[in-house]
Amino acid sequence: MPVPNSAQAASGGAKRKTNPNVLAETSESIAREPIARECVARESHRSPESAFKPVRRRTHAETLLLTCAVITLNAFGNLALAAGMKHRQLLGINPIGYISALFDPLVAAGVGLLILWLLTRMALMSWADLSFVVPVTAAGYVLSAILGRAFLGEQVGLDQWLGMALILAGSVLVGTTSHKTPPPCERVSMPLAGQGGEETT
Amino acid sequence: MTWTLLSIVVCATVLADLLQSREMKRAGEQDVSTRGLGRLLRMIAHRAPLGLAILCMAVSFFAFMALVQRAPISFVVPASALQFVVETVLAKSLLREHLGKRRMAGALLVAGGVILLAK
């Protein structure tokens, strides 16, 4: 194991594959290319652990699978919370009401599912664009309405069915678009990518 | 008061999502294993913008609760459809995401559907 030189030590050693030539090259290109600087900045924000793993881009199918998990967690979390809160009195500003509600098993399950929802949604945001995540996960409105009708006996009228159809159509439409805009460094090497409204799945 | 609460709900939600998306893209693709989720929890504690995003979500939640007590749900839900349009536009201008025609059409369909839901 060779002793790392000072340039490597200064860069933290863990941030990038440490090859002095590469380092010198990137710092030169930083001076010239504003886009390259952004790419290096993105890389250096990666945590040390992920820098050692080969970067594997998630496939579209994997992204859609995680999206389904996010939608399901949200819908069932909300359902459990709503079922647990339905027979309780209205909550005011008194914190004791909120704390005692947490001891209701249904409410606790709902809160747990919603925490899982938050974390999986964060992971999804690291895989996909915000403009992909937000419309596609809106399909959760549809699942929530169906669950509400099935388990809580809530009414669903014609307008609601029509609205749900529109939401579903919109989220399926967005679901067919490429889930991630390539970072600027890759857009430079592939000048045609991301131009002219091309959308590949 | 209604409009103030409504703008708090929309702004807080949009800000929370923008911050989360920006931070998560910087962090690189995260695992969804038990360890991966634990790491995400720790990230919320260590990265200030993520903490701020969670705070915004809480603000948005309580403002939403206050809003539904004052205004009919047929006003609240369609107004929250605004969030889909605003977030899509800001994802393009601030986060530099590529919006194709299909994505914009999809976002508009979703917003239209949410408006119909509350009728």
Image (cartoon, rainbow, N blue to C red):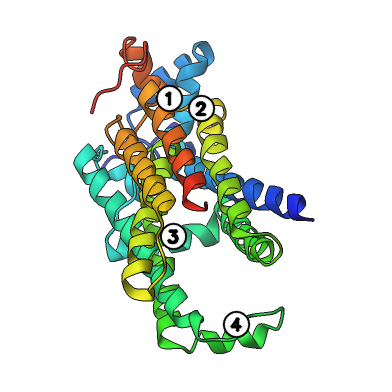
Q: Is residue A142 visible?
A: yes
- Identified at 72% across, 55% down, the residue is B5
* Residue farthest to the right, as pictured: B1
The image position of residue A109, as x and y in percent, is: 39, 78
Tags 1 and 2 both on a single chain: yes
Q: Nearer the viewer, residue B53 or A36?
A: B53
Marked residue chain, label 2: B
Tags 3 and 1 both on a single chain: no
- Identified at 58% across, 50% down, the residue is B13
Element at badge 1? Answer: loop
| Mark linked to residue A118 | 3
Label 4 belongs to which residue?
A98
Check if mark 3's residue and mark 1's residue have beta carbons within 8 Å: no
Label 2 belongs to which residue?
B92
Q: Is residue A12 visible?
A: no
Based on the displayed image, in which of its 4 quarters is residue A200 positioned?
A: top left
Element at badge 2? Answer: helix
**Distance from Cα at disc 3 to Cα at disc 1:** 25 Å
The C terminus of chain A lies in quadrant:
top left
Q: Residues within 10 Å of mark 1 (few under 14, many from 20)?
A: many
Tags 4 and 3 both on a single chain: yes
Of the residues shown, which amino acid type is indicated by label 3? Leu
Question: Does B20 sit above or below residue B34?
Answer: above
Label 1 belongs to which residue?
B99
Check if mark 1's residue and mark 2's residue have beta carbons within 8 Å: yes
Tags 4 and 2 both on a single chain: no
The image position of residue A27, as x and y in percent, is: 47, 21
Disc 3 or disc 1, which is closer to the eye? Answer: 1
| Mark linked to residue B42 | none
